[in-house]
Image (spheres, rainbow, N blue to C red):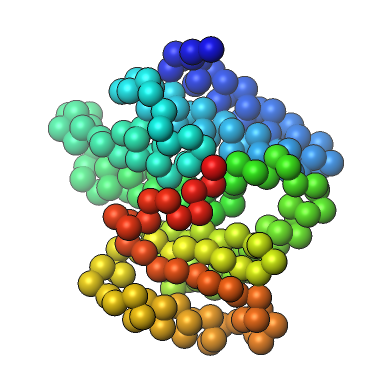
Amino acid sequence: MDFPPEHYFQTATQRMRQAQYLYQEGFSFALAIYVGGVAVECLLRAFKSRRDPTFDEKHHLLRLFAASGMLRVDRAKLQAKHWTDAQIDGHLRTLQVAVNEIFKLWANNYRFASEERLRSYLKQITGYQKVLTQRFPSPATVKLEDHDGIIGVITFAGFAGMETIDRQNLIGEIVAARLDPEERRRVQVIVGVTPDEGTGYLSGQ
């Protein structure tokens, strides 16, 4: 079944309302967060399919965001509407921060999680997330998963030119300084990559 951009956009607005209802209802947190992610995916697909109807990104939101072209703004057109450079840059920054937040907190396999499992998982993950994002704020991304221990990837342009051992030492120093012994024991591996290197890590498929 093929869907035109307008259909993806309509579905996105419906899924947003449905996610809000589920959240406010109070008993379907896992489903609410999953449906919210589907709303975002539909919106990105609406923008992407206006440029290219093929989808190689699957459910990877960062890839979809990049492919959607949402950051390829026509500055001259916006300036003609009396936008300043600062306003344009602020708009782009807002988009980047929003997508970063969604990428940190949503994965396609959440639909398989029980309420209790997902709440416990997010509570634990966001604790580690907070520590690392303080050192690597947006537009860097921190993506963590719990597989009987914390694994993850930090995508940060500042890693360019650094040897792998130096990246790992930097991450290790942050973990050692900011986490208690029990939290440190749960960390299996957190790798550091640049945006160009990051494709394929914790794809979320």
- Image position, residue 23 (x, y; %): 74, 39
Residue 118: x, y in percent?
Answer: 74, 52
Badge count: 0
| Residue drawn at 70 percent across, 40 percent down | 111
Image quadrant in which you'd find residue 92: top left
Horizontally, residue 140 falls left or right of residue 36, namely: left
Left or right placement of residue 108 versus residue 5 in this view: right
Is 177 drawn above or below residue 157 in the view shown? below
In front: 9, or 168?
Answer: 168
Q: What x and y, as percent, mark residue 68?
A: 36, 32
The answer to whether residue 119 is visible is yes
Decide if residue 51 is on the left or right side of residue 126: left
Which of these two is toward me, 162 or 102? 162
| 115 lies above or below 163 | above
Does the rendering let one see residue 70? no
Q: Residue at x 62, y 81 (%)?
A: 184
Q: Residue 36's spot in the image, x, y percent? A: 62, 37
Give the answer, above or below, for where 200 lies relative to 123.
above
| x 57%, y 20%: residue | 11
Quarter of the rendering containing residue 154: bottom left
The vertical placement of 171 against 140, above or below, is below
Q: Which residue is located at x 25 percent, y 35 percent?
A: 73
Q: Quadrant of the C terminus?
A: top right
